[in-house]
Amino acid sequence: MFQVKTFNAIAPEGMERFEKERYAINESDTPDGIILRSQKLHDYDFPKSVLAVARAGAGTNNIPVAECTEKGIVVFNTPGANANAVKELVLASLLLNVRPILQSVQWLEQQTGPNLEEQVEANKKQFAGHELVGKKLGVIGLGSIGAMIANDAYRLGMEVIGYDPYVSVDTAWSISRRVKRAQEMAEVLTTCDFITIHVPLLDSTKNLISTKELAMMKPSARLFNFSRGEIVDTQAVIQAVETKEIAGFTTDFAQEQLLHHPDVLVLPHLGASTEEAEINCAKMAARTLKRYLETGVIKYSVNFPTVDMSFRSPNRLTVIHQNVPNMLGTISSTIAEFGINIDNMVNRGRDQFAYTLVDVAEEDAAKLQKVADKLTETESIVRVRVIQNPEVLS
């Protein structure tokens, strides 16, 4: 039976995927897997039993990914599961920037008297706004969220230009051919009326938008950050707004210094705060964690490569190891020493580490454990598992 530990409240629609016959939830201090949302694990003492951590959300800044990688713990996230929720909030924010909707409602709430209708008609002209049709939107980062925003903004009548030097093949297919691709970020910054950022927080993207980039934008341009707070240099953007270098800034990440600026709209991190998004993230996190525990297949990991292989043999060996030469030879020769035949094998690398799946016809679990123990003695091998195929062995 697999032991799973949860942090935070995970939507029951996701937890229902863990069958009671095979999974125990929060019944052990030595879990096989962890599923969480925003709980910070940087001070968490990971038991040796932990094989994987699944985050019900896209960002993994609350997880010590580098530490997990060194320990052979696979970290999963749920890219795209909350994309629609974020997309809708960005589109709503675009509308709030061109139409003074919030201001008009606040004004109306303060009005009194028997001639309310006359007051409204006489004063509504102060809340006249603009339309999005014909305006140019720049999307920096064309992942799941950025691609959806680009497509829907075009359908709203906007001219859309996107920039992403690392766009995936799958995402490229999903983007409308009417969305123009920029070769340089400067093209987006210098030409667009609205610029929205959708990139992960990495060392290379911290303060991606700072003084230099803000100076390139049009004075009438408005900037949106729904990725991570650190993507935009806060002090630089405040300076740019106050000096009218740009027309406005909207962010989903609350910082005290951003509050009370008339041209800054701060939202309380509402991007993925929909019931549907929480359910989608929980389902996806549970599905990826469950699949890894049961079959060793990795998909949507932030620290290990995607590795998939049909599981038709009686048993499977999974090997997490350093990405160094001759590892496949070492794994194959060790298995051969025990007289075991390899049915199928796949290997993928990612940066300094790699992952190998080996399917074998051997049914003797004790014998396979001896193979795993010997492989673990190899200096470059981090973790080895033996997974039984219940459908074949039953």
Image (tube, rainbow, N blue to C red):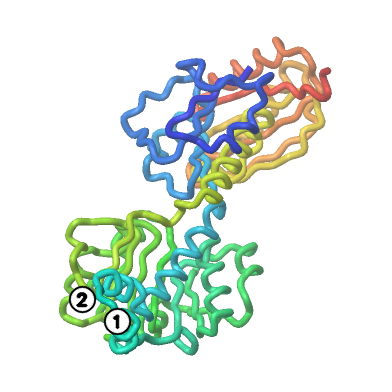
Q: Amino acid at mark 2?
A: Ala
Left/right placement of residue 178 relative to residue 265 reads: right
Instruction: Say which quadrant the C terminus sits in.
Output: top right
Q: Earlier in the sequence, mark 2 or mark 1?
A: 1
Residue identified by numbered label 2: 240
Q: What is the x, y in percent for residue 151?
A: 58, 74
What residue sits 61% from the left and 44% below the top? 299
Residue 200, position as x, y percentages in the image: 42, 57
Label 2, residues with CA under 10 Å away: few <14, some 14-19, many ≥20: many
Residue 38 in percent (x, y) is at 40, 40
The kind of residue on which mark 1 rests is Asn
Q: Place residue 198 in its image quadrant.
A: bottom left
Q: Quadrant of the N terminus?
A: top right
| Mark 1 Cα-neighbour bin, 10 Å: few <14, some 14–19, many ≥20 | few
Horizontal side of 254 relative to 320 (left or right) equals left
Camera-nearest label, 2 or 1: 1
**Residue on which the image places disc 1:** 115
269 up-or-down from 95: above or below: above
Q: Position of residue 357 (x, y in %)?
A: 68, 34
On the question of residue 347 being in view, the answer is yes
* Residue with the most extreme front position: 114
Which residue occupies 62% across, 22% down?
23
Residue, far top:
366
Q: Nearer the viewer, residue 379 or 154?
A: 154
Query: On the image, which quarter does residue 108 sit in?
Result: bottom left
Q: Nearer the viewer, residue 87 or 348?
A: 87
Element at label 1: loop
Residue 330, visible in the rendered structure? no
